[in-house]
Image (tube, rainbow, N blue to C red):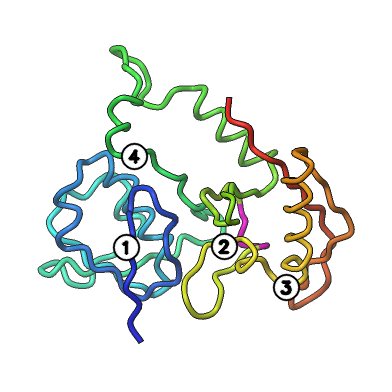
Amino acid sequence: MVIFAVQNLISDPPFSKLDLISCRNVLIYLGAELQKKIIPLFHFMLTQEGQPVFGVFREHRGFADLFRPLDTKWKIYRRKDLGLGQRTDYPPRFAPVDQLAAARPIRRPGQAETPVQEVLGKVILDRYAPPCVLINDNYDILHFQGATDRFLAPPVGEPSYNLLKMAREGLRHKLAPLLRQAVKEKTAVTCTGLHLLSPRARRPLTSRCSPWRPL
């Protein structure tokens, strides 16, 4: 079976558990800034023994930490396992290409490339914020934050990023009424007493759904 799908590497949520990614005629058309964002995304998408086939591009700093070469002539690599201590979270959703230049702040001479506020914000989110997702009206996931793989998993069969299809056993049937209530009442709704069914034990947890109001 072959599945054909339109996939925007810059803006769409990525596939996962792929054995092979061939992009010989893709990276050459992207600038260095986008390459630095997309190549770690390929590492996320591949299985532990997955192999990417890269075309001609300039390897950026940190590339060797993600992939090891299998055939330098044909640019075939193998994914490296970063281990639990070096785990890479799902990359954030990218802005449209035409907004990257406009959104990039002006850097003064001697100023660090990454603003201190951005680094601090990421540390606070990673350490104190619970895992969460942003969804649209159809319950399709637009953005992942934190280690959501404990609660979500790719469904069997056709790829999907629908929250209700990705929710693990014990959560799926509880999320739908919780989401409907949050939308109907236009307020945050919390559900306690949920149990995530893991291979070893039942894990209690709390889920909170909140409508997003753009500023």
Give the residue at mark 2. 162
Give the position of the C terminus as an image quadrant: top right
Separation of marks 4 and 3 at Cα, in angstroms: 35 Å
Q: Which mark is residue 169?
A: 3
Report the amino acid beneath label 1.
Answer: Val
Q: Which mark is residue 150?
A: none
Q: Earlier in the sequence, mark 2 or mark 1?
A: 1
Q: Which mark is residue 6?
A: 1
Q: Nearer the viewer, residue 150 or 1?
A: 1
Q: Earlier in the sequence, mark 4 or mark 1?
A: 1
Q: Which residues are magenta?
A: 147-151
Report the amino acid beneath label 4.
Answer: Pro
Q: Secondary structure at mark 4?
A: loop
**Mark 3 residue crowding within 10 angstroms, few (<14) / some (14–19) / many (20+):** some
Query: Residue 66's x, y, as percent?
Result: 36, 58
Separation of marks 4 and 2 at Cα, in angstroms: 22 Å
Give the residue at mark 4. 96
**Mark 2 residue crowding within 10 angstroms, few (<14) / some (14–19) / many (20+):** some
Point 39% across, 65% down: residue: 80
Is 24 placed left or right of 211 in the picture?
left
Q: Secondary structure at mark 1?
A: loop
